[in-house]
Image (cartoon, grey):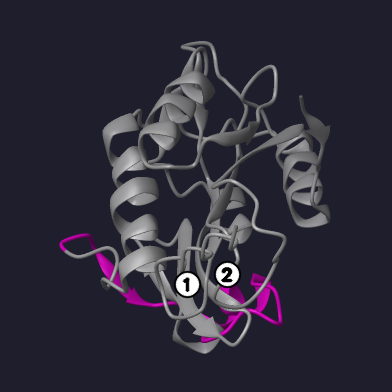
């Protein structure tokens, strides 16, 4: 099951690149790094509070990159440039929950900064689904193909709560560059949220 989804910033970036006479540099394939960012960095922070992105190149994000982030995102002013100016990462917590965000900074993308989060588009979502299920994110709505035109979502089983300490961990991934002639797409938008205070508190069993 999939839902069409094309954020305005991404649409503007894609149209701009399509109109540009310069062909953007190919995105370097690195599925192992993408999986690490999703399941070690972001999931490790959302569930257990571990500081993400250790050992990866980071520095404070530019104001232009920060302004691209959703205004309600907690700690957005502490966002970092991740790997290169092409990516911005943010993580933080408010009473509604914890979040971890990795996104493509479209101005850097348009300027030709090479991408580093490439994945083989064919089979990528299925591989994420297998890993997500192993991590307890067993509910999913997965697009037919990995592209900028449809988002995919994975979640822990529902709790009836969408905020606070009982909300389930959930994540969405969207391609920010479509598959090229090599079949490599860019996994350039990763968004994960979870319970405030970390690992979801299990609901007590109902009395008999």
Disc 1 is placed on an element classified as: strand
**Left or right of 186: which side holds 13?**
right
Badge 1: how crowded within 10 Å, few (<14), some, or many (20+)? many
In the depicted structure, whether residue 171 falls above or below residue 1: below
Residue at the spot x=26%, y=71% of the render?
A: 50
Q: How far across and down, in percent of the image, does residue 168 sit?
A: 57, 58
SS class, disc 2: loop
Residue 101 placement (x, y as % from top left): 51, 63
Task: List the residue tagged with mark 1.
Answer: 90
Q: Which residue is mark 2?
A: 166
How far across and how far down the image is residue 46, in percent?
A: 42, 66
Q: Residue 174 falls in which quadrant of the image?
A: top right
Q: Nearer the viewer, mark 2 or mark 1?
A: 2
Q: Is residue 27 left or right of residue 176?
A: left
Magenta-colored span:
55-75
Q: Earlier in the sequence, mark 2 or mark 1?
A: 1
Q: Residues within 10 Å of mark 2 (few under 14, many from 20)?
A: many
> Which quadrant is home to the C terminus?
bottom right
Is residue 26 shown above or below 59?
above
Compared to residue 41, the image places residue 23 above or below, namely above
Quadrant housing residue 34: top left
Does the rendering let one see residue 83?
Answer: no
Image quadrant assignment for residue 14: top right
Q: Nearer the viewer, residue 93 or 52?
A: 93
Image position of 67 (left or right of 89): right
């Amino acid at each position: 099951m999939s839902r069409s989804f094309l954020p305005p910033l991404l649409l503007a970036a894609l149209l701009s690149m399509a109109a540009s006479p310069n062909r953007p540099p190919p995105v370097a394939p690195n599925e192992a790094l993408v999986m690490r960012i999703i399941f070690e960095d972001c999931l490790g922070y959302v569930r257990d509070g571990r500081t993400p992105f250790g050992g990866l190149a980071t520095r404070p994000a530019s104001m232009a990159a920060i302004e691209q982030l959703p205004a309600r995102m907690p700690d957005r002013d502490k966002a970092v440039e991740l790997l290169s100016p092409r990516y911005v990462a943010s993580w933080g917590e408010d009473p509604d929950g914890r979040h971890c965000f990795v996104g493509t900074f479209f101005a850097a993308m348009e300027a030709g900064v090479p991408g580093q989060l490439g994945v083989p588009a064919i089979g990528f979502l299925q591989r994420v689904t297998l890993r997500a299920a192993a991590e307890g994110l067993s509910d999913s709505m997965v697009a037919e193909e990995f592209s900028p035109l449809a988002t995919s979502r994975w979640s822990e089983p529902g709790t009836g709560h969408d905020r606070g300490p009982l909300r389930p961990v959930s994540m969405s991934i969207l391609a920010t560059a479509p598959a090229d002639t090599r079949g490599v797409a860019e996994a350039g938008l990763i968004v994960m949220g979870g319970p405030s205070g970390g690992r979801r508190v299990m609901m007590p069993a109902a009395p008999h």
